[in-house]
Image (cartoon, rainbow, N blue to C red):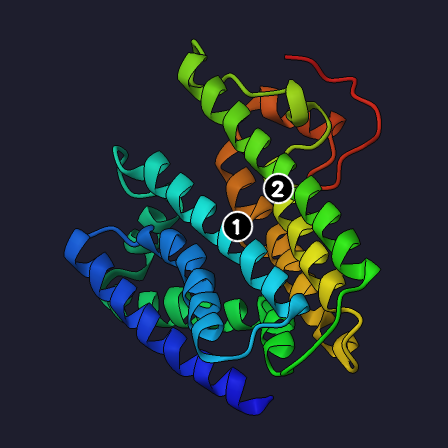
Amino acid sequence: MSDVFLESAILLGGHIIVWFLISIFLKRNDVADIGWGMGFVLLCTYLALMRPIHPIVGVCYLLTFIWGIRLSFYLYKRNRRKSEDFRYLQWRKEWGRSFYVRSFLQVYVLQSMFLLMIISPVLYAASFSTSYWSIFIVAGIVIWLIGFYWQVVGDRQLATFISERKHKEDILKSGLWAFSRHPNYFGEVVMWWGIYLIVWPLPGSLVFIIGPLTITLLIRYVSGVPMLERKYEVNQAYQAYKKQVPALFPRLSSRSRK
């Protein structure tokens, strides 16, 4: 098992160096967000080519690959005509002369560590030479598809709203955004719990619940919801919306309307 994690860590190390150099060349650090999804794609592609593929890990590779490709392409398409993301611009100002060192360590290296933790259930599955089909594979796929729906539809609804809104201060409160302030993030969390469920039948898999737990905690309390909502601290409409609609996990009924 250890060799799978070691190989993945080495490969990921080269991956983040490449993206860090790209960020310097383009003078925009938000390419790290595109590199994030592509890191998962890289590991799954490498392991699929170098190791035996059995039912559990094969399904995990496929679902992770689809998620990573879609996310990276979506972020590239969203950001290509915009200036650097406000979060990275703020760090660029705050870090001053130490920007490049802190950027490499606090964005790229730290990101790769979290990536390894999140994908750890898949890496663990890759350490087995054989497995079998089970009801957990079917259940995990169903859960993943639910999460994929929430993320894709949530992103699409947001993109449409932004392109059509009349005022910059307007906020989206309809569709999936009436049930959760961040349905796209919710979908991402659900997808990783679905992947973990697929791995569940493997002996010793309980340890690797750290994967979905990490992405859940990161999105809810660290790099997802808190950082994004900081942008709307002075938006009164958003603060009212915040009181009505939960941050991540959707409520069963919808009272908020656009």
Q: Is residue 215 above or below residue 233?
A: below
Residue 148 numbered mark, or none: 2
**In this orientation, which residue lies closer to the viewer: 124 or 137?**
137
Q: Residue at x 65, y 71 (%)?
A: 121
**In this orientation, which residue lies closer to the viewer: 86 or 214?**
214
Q: Residue at x 60, y 19 (%)?
A: 237
Q: Is residue 149 above or below residue 225?
A: above
Amino acid found under the numbered disc labelled 1: Trp
Q: The C terminus lies in which quarter of the figure?
A: top right
Check disc 2 and report its element: helix, strand or loop.
Answer: helix
Q: Position of residue 76 (x, y in %)?
A: 33, 42
Q: Residue at x 41, y 68 (%)?
A: 106
Could you say which quadrant of the image residue 177 lies in?
top right
Q: Position of residue 218 (x, y in %)?
A: 60, 58
Q: Position of residue 234 (x, y in %)?
A: 52, 29
- Does residue 182 appear in the picture of this structure? no
Q: Is residue 235 above or below residue 250?
A: above
- For this orientation, the residue located farthest to the bottom is 2
**In this orientation, which residue lies closer to the viewer: 42 or 170?**
42
Check disc 1 and report its element: helix, strand or loop.
Answer: helix
**In this orientation, which residue lies closer to the viewer: 229 or 180?**
180
Q: Are marks 2 and 1 in contact (CB under 8 Å)?
A: yes
Amino acid found under the numbered disc labelled 2: Phe
- For this orientation, the residue located farthest to the left is 25
- Does residue 245 appear in the picture of this structure? yes
Q: Is residue 147 left or right of residue 89?
A: right
Q: Residues within 10 Å of mark 1 (few under 14, many from 20)?
A: many
Q: CA distance from mark 2 to mark 1?
A: 8 Å
Q: Where is mark 1, residue-wise?
A: 67
Q: The N terminus lies in which quarter of the figure?
A: bottom right
